[in-house]
Image: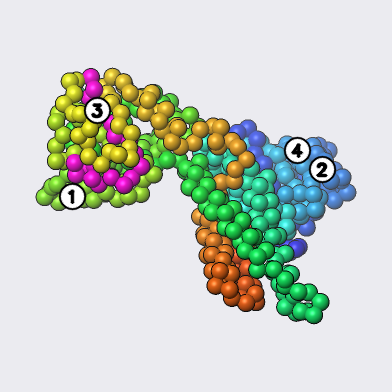
Amino acid sequence: MCYQDTIAAIATSSKNGSISVIRISGNQALEFVSKIFFHENHEPINLCECKSHSIHYGFICDEEKSIIDEVLVLIMKAPRSYTMEDVVEIQCHGGSFICQNILELLVHQGIRIAEPGEFTKRAFLNGRIDLSQAESVMDVIQSGSKIALHNSMSQLRGQIKKKIETLREMILNDIAFLEAALDDPEHITLGNFSETVKAHTVFLLGEVQHLLDNSQNGRIIKEGIYTAIVGKPNVGKSSFLNCILREERAIVTEIAGTTRDTLEEEMRIGSTLIHLIDTAGIHDTDDKVEKIGVEKARKTIEDADFIICIIDASEALTDEDRIVLEEIKDRQGVILLNKKDLTSQINREEIPYSENKRVLPFSAKTGDGLRELEEYLNQLFLTDSVSYNDEIYITNVRQKQALIETMESLTNLSHSIEDGMPEDFYSIDLMGAYEALGKIIGETLEDDIADKIFKDFCMGK
Ligand code: GDP
């Protein structure tokens, strides 16, 4: 596909750095940049005549031939470029003033400022990358942890695409055979086709289910584990938060915009990002303001991946503790018997609803038990060895939705086979699964969805 207009944007972060890069893409990129690019003696440099993938030293000058900046210019001619169009990158001195100045000169020549994500959109529309790769460009830019970066990089290399294409090919073969046999029954017999499709469907259901199962881990890799700290008032929730964060103080960031009743902090255990959310104590109250806090705590529990429930073990178990424990009885979590530095008044066995949870003695005052807790979290969630394997973690909500649609079509298909429906019934669900999988890599993508996705990108990417 060839676009009429040539686009430009600052491709580097505007905040810091001694060098900035302005990226220009389009069929007039070389011509437009040549108009503002000169040798020291003011002789023009014609980039159209230069070899692709070459670097040129010179000066960007304005209409009055005043030097704006001393720069290096890289040229990558179509199709061997990020967008598959002619691309020019101007390496100028850092700082937004110079960049803006150069951009203005380019706009004056007829270049348009790129929309967010437009370079990547062109790379996708010109067929250089598939949609899962395009989305991973965004993830690489934003990745908050080493594992998330690793995962996004593997997507960028097209791991998801490879996997999805293999699955689609299997379906496509079945569709093609079925269509051919239905069209030309004299020469192609269906034979035991339903057995073949059945076996394929079982295989495909397994593969798609596996990708879906992994997507939960994928979200954790990308976003971290949302962990709610719960317990009645005064059991030591805030002390626990301070205790666990003290170790990690250097990389702790307080999230802006949190309210009085829930406090959020981020930390890492190994390479795993953990969001800790300290909730208001859950207890019965008639106080209007407190009620709001308790409701919010309940909502936090509902949304959390993991619960850390704190009990004050220096006192006997109370009804308030029981209310909290009941609230979280079906949730994955750990129960900390806090204040172990004091004489314990609670027996593990008397803690209700604790069958599915690890119970750990703890002291937020001394930090005793912290190592066990961290080890347990690491073991429950991702360790480096799990996350650096070749598994595919689909983290994107849109891609996950497409997997769910694929599952639905495949499930319908397997019902048709089981019910002994005639083979021509298979077509619609095979196509459904094929198209749903295609959405992941952008093969059956409506333009408006593409626009929406690319709008989420940063400028210059
Ligand atoms: P929250 O209301 O659940 O957030 O509880 P706080 O963190 O404010 O703690 C309530 C009281 O218990 C404070 O006086 C803390 O110093 C004390 N406390 C918390 N953890 C421990 C502990 O492990 N040992 C002892 N001895 N006191 C603790």
Badge 2 or badge 3: first in the primary sequence: 2
In this view, the mark in front (2 or 1): 1
Q: Of 140 and 256, which appears nearest the observer?
A: 140
Cβ at disc 3 under 8 Å from ligand 1: yes
Location of mark 3 (residue): 338
Q: Residues within 10 Å of mark 2 (few under 14, many from 20)?
A: few
Location of mark 2 (residue): 53
Residue 400's x, y, as percent? 53, 56
Q: Amino acid at mark 4?
A: Leu
* Image position of 65 with respect to 384: above or below: below
Q: Amino acid at mark 3?
A: Asn
In this view, the mark in front (1 or 3): 3
Magenta-highlighted residues: 322-341
Q: Amino acid at mark 1?
A: Lys
Q: Amino acid at mark 2?
A: His
**In what element is the residue under mark 1?**
helix
**Spatial CA span between label 4 and label 2:** 13 Å
